[in-house]
Image (cartoon, helix red, strand yellow):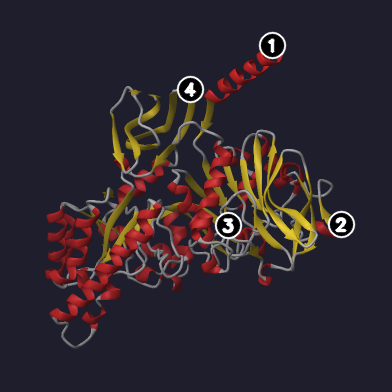
Amino acid sequence: MIKQIALIFLFTVFSMFAQAQLTYQLPKVLILTTGDGSGRGTVSDGVVLALQSFNKMGVFVRLENRSALLKPDLLSKYSILIIPTIPDYHDKPLKNALTYMSDLEMQNINEWVKKGGTLLTDVNAGRNTLKKYDRVLNDGVLDQSDWLLAKSFGVKLREIDIASFILKDNDLHIWNNEIIIPNKIGKWLLIPVKTERNTETPMHWKTANGNLPALTVHLYGKGKVIMLPTFYLLHPKKDAGLSTEKQIEHFYQFVYNQNIGNRQYTIQLLPWKDAHTSAYCQTFDDGGTITQYKRIIHFTNQNKLPTVFFVTPHIDSAAAKLLINAPYISIQGHSFNHPDFRKLNFSETENEFLMNRLFWKKKFTGFRFPYVSNSFWGMYWMNKLDFKYDTSIAANHMDFIRGAVVPYNIPIFKDDFYQTLDLLEISQIYHSDWFFYQKVLEKAPYNEQQQKQDAERFRRYLFRYFSEVVQPNNGVMVYLGHPMYSGISETTLQPLQNFLAYIKEQNVWITSLNTVAERWNKLKKLDVQIKENHRKVKIHLDTHGEIIKGLSLKLNQKPTKISYDMKFKMKKYGELYYLILDVNHKKVITLHF
C-alpha cells in the first residue's frame, strides 16, 4: 500500500513537472490555393474566413500553390498546413486540384507531419493520381497499399452511399445541430472504415446501423492530421457551404489549439502597432476641381491624417502640386492612361506602370486599378516591378463575402500558368463615396437637402462596416474616396469627419496604407518561440534582421515582473493585457506571473 502511494506521488510530481515545462512556437499557416475562378488575385470565401480567423489569433498566413508540396524547405517554415480540395480553392487548370497527388507529394506531406506539423484536409486529398486515375478503383478502398497518406491520416477509407447519413458533432460543440449533407456535394463519399491507434473521432456519421467515424484527428510522429469528411464543412453557407462564419472561426480555433497544445498562459501576436486592435487607412483616387482638392487637403491637415492618393498624369497640374506639397499626403500609382486593365495585353500592361512611374519620377510601391478592375497581367507586372501592395479587391462581408479585412499575398493563374506573389492585397471598402453621391453626375442641381440625406446613408455604412466586419476581425479598413464626391462640400465630407472622431475612441491604429504594407512584410518574417516553466515564461523573438517598433503581444494574465533590455510597456484593453515592445534581431523577454 505504501509502495503504491509512493508511486502515485512520484507520478503526480512528474506529471506536474512535465506540465510546468512547455516549449512551443507561435504557429504560421500555409494554405494551398490558386485563388478563385477569376485568376486575378481574389480568393474563395472559405480562404477569406480562414485568413481572418487566424488573424484574430495572431497567426500569420501565407497562400501558396501546390508546388509547395515539392519544397520541403518551404514546408518546414510552417507548422499548420491547410489543403482544401473543393472548387474555387483550386480552380483552373484541373491539375491544380489537390484530389490529384503524386506519391512524392504524399511522401513529403507524411514527413512534414511526422516532424511536428499539423495538417488540415479532407478525405479526398490525393485520392487520384496525377494521370487522373482514381485510386479507389483498385480494390474499392484507400489504404497504404496505394495511398501513402494513409500513414499520416491513420485511416482506411471506403466509398459509401451517404444519402441517409447525418453528420453529428459529438465532442467539438461547434455544430450544435446535426448536419444533413445536400445532394449537390455528392451522394457517395469516402468514409473511414478503420482507424489506427492514436486516432480521435470528434464527429461521427449517424447511420441506421450505428455510427461511423467522420472527422478524425490522428497523431503521427510529432505531428497530427485533422481529416474532414468534406471541406464544404469549412465553406460558408452564403456560398453553398455547410457552416456559419462563426462556426468556421471556432473550428480554426480548434485547429490552432491542436497545434499549440495545452498551455498555462495564452500569448498571442497582435499585428497592429502599440496594441491597437484594428487599423484604418484613408485613400483617395484623383479627380475633381481645385476647390474640392483643397477641401480634402484641409481635412487631412486639420486631422493630421496620413492619406494616400492614387494618381494618373491626367490630374490637374495645380492639384498635383498641392498633393505633392501636402504634409500628410503621399501619392501612389493609378496607371498612365486610366484604362480597363482587363482589356490590355502583356506589353500594354507593363507600359502603363512604366510610363506612370516615368511621368512622376517616382518608384511607386502601391497601386489601385482604374475602375478597381484588377487583371492577371496587372498583378503579374506589379509583382515583377517590385510593388508592395495593391488595393483594388473590395471587401464586403455584409451582403456576401468578397475580399478580406486582413492583408494577404496574392495568388494568380491563367491557363496553364500559375504563380504565388509576394504582392499584398489590402482590400478597400466595397462601397466608395461614389456609391452614395452619384447625384453629382446628374444635370440637375445637387442641393443641400439631398447631400444631407446621402451623407447620412454614407455615415451609417461606414459605421456598420467597421463595427460588423473590421472590428470583430481585428482587421484593417481602407477608405476609398474621391475629391469630386467627398469633397463636394462640408456636408459630403461630414460622414468621414464623424467616423474619424468615432474610431479615435476605439483603439484603432490610424495610419498610412504604405505603413501597413511595410509592417505586414516585417511581421511575416517574425518567429516567436515560447518556453513556459511554472510561473516563468521566456519569449524568444527573431525578426531576421528587421526592426519592429510597437510589437504587441496579447496576454490573458498580467505579469508581476518583466525582464527586457529594450523599451517596453503594458496596456490593458477590455479584459486583456498587452505587452508592447520594440524588437531588433534576436531578443528574449522574460515574464513572471
First of labels 2, 3 by sequence position: 2
Q: Distance between the residues labelled 4 and 2?
A: 53 Å
Q: Position of residue 167 (x, y in %)?
A: 67, 60
**Residue lying furthest bottom:** 444
User: For the residue marked with disc 3, what is the amino acid?
Assistant: Trp
In the picture of the structure, the residue carrying the numbered disc 1 is 2
Give how far apart the Cα atoms at labels 3 and 4 are.
Answer: 35 Å
Residue type at the position of mark 2: Asn
User: Which sits earlier in the primary sequence, circle 4 or circle 2?
Assistant: 2
Q: Nearer the observer, disc 4 or disc 1?
A: 1
**Label 3 belongs to which residue?**
175
Asked which secondary structure carries label 2, the reply is: loop
**In the image, is residue 472 above or below residue 24?**
below
Q: Which of marks 2 and 1 is in front?
A: 1
Give the secondary structure at mark 1: helix
Q: Which residue is under mark 4?
A: 534
Task: Provide residue 575's location: percent of width, then percent of height.
Answer: 34, 41
Disc 4 versus disc 2: nearer the observer: 4
The earlier-in-sequence mark between 1 and 3 is 1
Using a 10 Å C-alpha cutoff, classify the residue at mark 4 as few (fewer than 14 neighbours), some (14 to 19) or many (20 or more): some
- Residue density around tag 1, few if under 14, some if 14–19, many if 20 or more, within 10 Å: few
Q: Nearer the viewer, residue 65 or 53?
A: 53
Q: Name the residue under label 2.
A: 138
Tell me the amino acid under the disc marked 1.
Answer: Ile
Q: Which of marks 2 and 3 is in front?
A: 3
Which is nearer the N-term, disc 4 or disc 1? 1
Separation of residues labelled 4 and 1 (CA atoms): 29 Å
- Quarter the C terminus occupies: top left
- Mark 3 / mark 4, whichever is N-terminal: 3
Q: Is residue 527 left or right of residue 16?
A: left
